[in-house]
Amino acid sequence: MKKRLLSLIAPNIPPARTNKSCRYIFAILLALFLIIPIASASVTMTGAMKEVYNLGEQIPVSGAVTAADSINGFLKVAVECNGRSFPARLVPLNMPAGQRLFPSQIAIGPVLLSSEMEGECRVRVSVIENNVETEYGFSKYFTASNDLKASFRINEKDVQAGDDLTVTGSIIRLDSTAINGVAEVYGVFNDEEYLLDVVNIEEGAFSYSFTTKAVPAGLYTIEVFARDSYGNSKRFKAASYTLSNQLKVTAVLERAALFPGEQLKIEGMAKTVKGTSASDATAYASFDGGESAAAVVDGKFSFEIELSNAISSGMHTISVSAEDREGNSGSTAVEFSVTPVATSLLLDMQSADALPLGSIEFKPRLLDQADALLDEEIAVEITDSKRNVIYSGEAVSGKRMNYTLLQQALPGLWKLKASYAGLEAVSEFVVGEVHDLKIEVVGAVLTFSNTGNVIWRDDVEVVLEGEKGVFNEYLRKSIKPGEHLQMDLGKQAPTGTYKLTASLPGRTETFENFIIEDGKNVYSLNIVYIIMLLLVVGLIVYELTLLFKKGARMTPKLDKDDLHRLGKTVKSRVDAKTREDNEKKKLVDDYKRMTLEEIKRTEDKMKPAYPDKPWRKRVERKPVSKKGESDMGGAAGFFGGF
């Protein structure tokens, strides 16, 4: 049996060493059984816990220990906070098997929170036997805090230098128990703090009195830093007050809206911060660099100021102040508005020249009594060279305005007039001449539009070059500005695709792939067909001549058989000629078809810029060709007669 157990535990040990190795292994196993404790008890924690405790508070500990066997050891109580353990006490634990409650059956007192126990904490109770912790239990988590609560009051909020102030309050722990300790009193002004005093706190009561001094006026705050013997502490903003060495000055205007040159009247009062009327004081009114003075009688004063005729329009501010013999002073401000009076109207233009479809830019400026710009609407009127009113509307003073001339704006001297409440300003500009003709293509119709501002009197030559030949047409009519004239080329040339060229003075416009779908009918015979017809007729005449000559030499007359043979011979020759003519015609047709296909492929490669229009427009600035000159060649010349 021993060998079998050894072979299971240590199969690689040689047989000669089996007995010795077996003793070592059993010794190790026995030591392990002695070292490893066997849990024979459990600890549970009960009882209600607060969420927050102050430092120095006692926390009651309650729960139960349950054991299957008797226990002879200790109960260890500790507080765990933020990863640290603070042991509180060891309580002897001698109990038989069963359950014991604490603190009723096991004397475990409350745990005192020290100054180091801050943060998230819990109470841990564990069973100690033979210096080994065999079982433990935890309470719920709670917060150990050094926070305090307090309430304060001050006897007065608004004070002047020399007044007495008292701050009182009550400082307690979180469980509302009063503390005993000390408090440091600070005065805070402009984010700087000054230590005023240190006072004792007895049974939570706090009191501090002091006399204000001639320090800078403003808002002061009293802060109290309180602490007790357990380390609970907190800084409180106890109270605040406004220290003033000023007078309360008020002023009103008789009228808040005036015209230049009118008289301004002010009435006012000066009081202390406590509401009493100031005495032995003087009031001052400062306006536009000048100052007026008036005596304060029973807290009242008044001023009369005459406004300048050239005073600026808009809002104005008058500073009013008062000062007494103790050095208390105060100030206020009143505002009034000056109604502007328009005195001049100016009209600025960027340029004195313009063209149709161009714009003129101008800016009217309405100025008041102080030469300041007024934001008002100005009436604007524009007349052309024949004194016709072209535009009438409104413009805002000080803002630029653009007016775009029409395409048919008359050339010559135009006028721009601005007016406002009896004021008037006039400027002139010149509209130049524009001599232009626009050509548009719709189907086979050319439309000539006069886009200038003068009558079009020049001739326009139109040339069509295509497979059906060259065709010329001329436009010799006058066109007024804005008018249109049309030319139907379908009545001048046959159906086909052409290159259209329109020659105007100084420029040439070209329209590629100009298509006439329903053009003029042209009848002609191809020269090849004429030659072939002449050859056939000549051959027939030649054969007949030979027959007549042969018949004249022959003595006997031809019988029917001879005539039949002669007819067959002539017919066979005519048939052969006809086949030859058909072959030639087929060659011509094939050449024509191949040429047209090549033209079509070339057109497809051109990819017109406007797919919905079968022509492409090109404008060339080149000398105009002489009338009547044209050139035909290639496939277009060969097939022009069909």
Image (cartoon, rainbow, N blue to C red):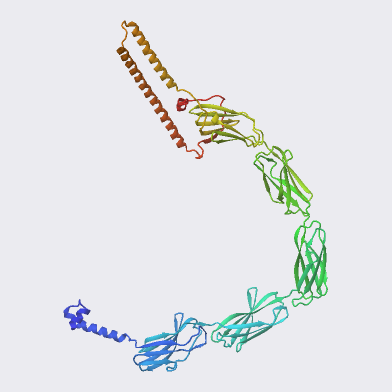
| Residue ID at (70%, 74%) | 217
Where is residue 521 shown, x and y percent of the image? Answer: 51, 27
- In-image side of 89 versus 37 (left or right): right
Where is residue 260 shown, x and y percent of the image? Answer: 80, 58
Residues 260 and 421: in front is: 421
- In-image side of 107 versus 250 (left or right): left
Residues 485 and 616: in front is: 485
- In-image side of 630 versus 37 (left or right): right
- In-image side of 534 versus 459 (left or right): left
- In the rendered image, the quadrant that contains the N terminus is bottom left
In the image, is residue 543 above or below residue 311? above
| Residue ID at (36%, 18%) | 574
In the image, is residue 73 above or below residue 328? below
> For the view shown, which residue lies furthest in the front direction?
560
Task: State which quadrant residue 73 falls in.
Answer: bottom left
Where is residue 422 shown, x and y percent of the image? Answer: 79, 49
Where is residue 457 shown, x and y percent of the image? Answer: 64, 30
